[in-house]
Image: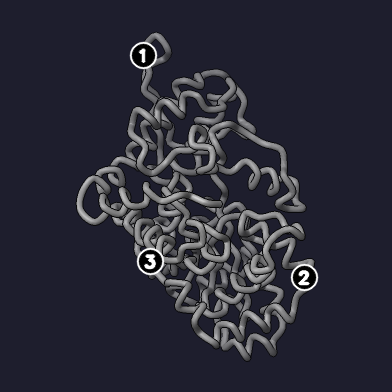
Amino acid sequence: MDVEAKVDVFKKIMAEIITEDELRTLFETKERPLAYDGFEPSGIAHLPLVYKGIIIEKLNEIGVEFNILLADSFAWINNKMGGDLEKIRRVAEYFKELWKPMDIKVNYIWHKEYFDNPEYWKKVILIAKNHTISRAKRAMTIAGRLGNDSNPMAFLFYPSMQCADIFHMNVDICQLGLDQRKVNMLAREIAGKKDLVEIFGYTGGVNNKPVIASHKLLPGLEGPKKGEGYDENEAIDKMISSKMSKSKPDTCIFAHDSREEIFRKIRKAYCPEKVVEDNPILFYAKEIVFLKFGSMKIEREEKFGGDVEYETYEELERDFREGKLHPLDLKNAVADYLDKIIAPIREHFEKGKAKALLEEIKTYEITR
């Protein structure tokens, strides 16, 4: 696959690339660039983690290697699982099981190994010395927190630590969700300070700056919400505020939902007839179904037009906008495809180590 084709794969998936020219240069100079993503272990997995796996699968296919940071120390700071580190690490082991049925290759890294490393903390402090308290507060939205003065002091370490991860892993691409862009932009600014780059020994990215490739955020089933102040950019703020949340189980698809439960939730979802903007069901069709399968078949009775198969999302969107595709037919098709993706995960957790982990995690009290 040539360089332009690889860049096109990124453009198809990502909400934002900073910068596209640097990404192109990266593929011209490195056969297997290193990207990273990570997550805080935080209870039962939902659709965004499955979506993340599909993205990794597609990027693996074009030669991108992945570090997945199991952010146990971040989850401890953020008081997930009541701040119980052992439970946090058990949840991380469960998350690792989740991707086993998917065709992805990643390197798992426990963040606690960095947390206990003095060289890592040297990077954290140097980064903290080179940005402000105000900047740290604004960037705290990466942890799902707004930067107010009632937060624990420990939260202020979060942005500098996440920024240090990038240099400590020597990654080329920060491939996280759009809600993480603030800390990634901070990393690019820090990388512009050549004296720090030399101290860090960072050689990733292009001209010692990481490329930022931010994927889109899956919206909740309830439809769009007003921005809650997570980002100064109105569109990004709205996307972050509307993303699927495990705290609202009826508007969230979980990785272990039954076929019946998936259909029940999807059929109740926000999907007004002929309305394309902020339509979560169309979003899942484009960003999950077409990304995973390349086409989409709608099965319906002959009196409603019979079966139709769409080779591109644009064709499907056009028919929906023009009223040629009914919301219920679209919902049923999306639910069926989501079930095809989730079914192997469900089956994996019906036996052995995976089943025992899931049953254990279900007993934990989930804290935010």
Q: Is residue 142 above or below residue 159?
A: above
Q: Do tag 3 and tag 2 residues touch (Cβ < 8 Å)?
A: no
Specify the label residue 106 is tagged with: 3
Q: CA–CA distance between discs 1 and 2?
A: 60 Å
Counting from the top left corner in percent of width and height, residue 280 is at: 55, 34
Q: CA–CA distance between discs 3 and 2?
A: 34 Å
Q: Is the N terminus in the top left, top right, bottom left or bottom right quadrant?
A: bottom left
Q: Is residue 210 above or below residue 223?
A: below
Query: Residue, x 61% and y 70% (percent of image)?
Result: 22
Sooner in the amino-acid sequence: mark 3 or mark 1: 3
Sooner in the amino-acid sequence: mark 3 or mark 2: 3
Q: Nearer the viewer, residue 227 or 175?
A: 227
Q: Secondary structure at mark 2?
A: helix
Counting from the top left corner in percent of width and height, residue 91 is at: 39, 58
Query: Residue, x 50% and y 84% (percent of image)?
Result: 117
Residue type at mark 3? Val
Q: Nearer the viewer, mark 3 or mark 2?
A: 2
Counting from the top left corner in percent of width and height, residue 33 is at: 47, 72
Q: Nearer the viewer, mark 1 or mark 2?
A: 2
Left/right of residue 302 with respect to residue 282 in the rendered view: left
Left/right of residue 328 with respect to residue 125 in the rendered view: left
Residue type at mark 1? Glu
The answer to which image quadrant residue 305 occupies is: top left
Residue type at mark 2? Ile
Specify the label residue 133 is tagged with: 2
Q: Secondary structure at mark 1?
A: loop
Residue sitting at the far left? 352
Disc 1 designates what residue?
Answer: 301
Q: Secondary structure at mark 3?
A: loop
Q: Nearer the viewer, residue 221 or 362?
A: 362
Q: Nearer the viewer, mark 3 or mark 1?
A: 3
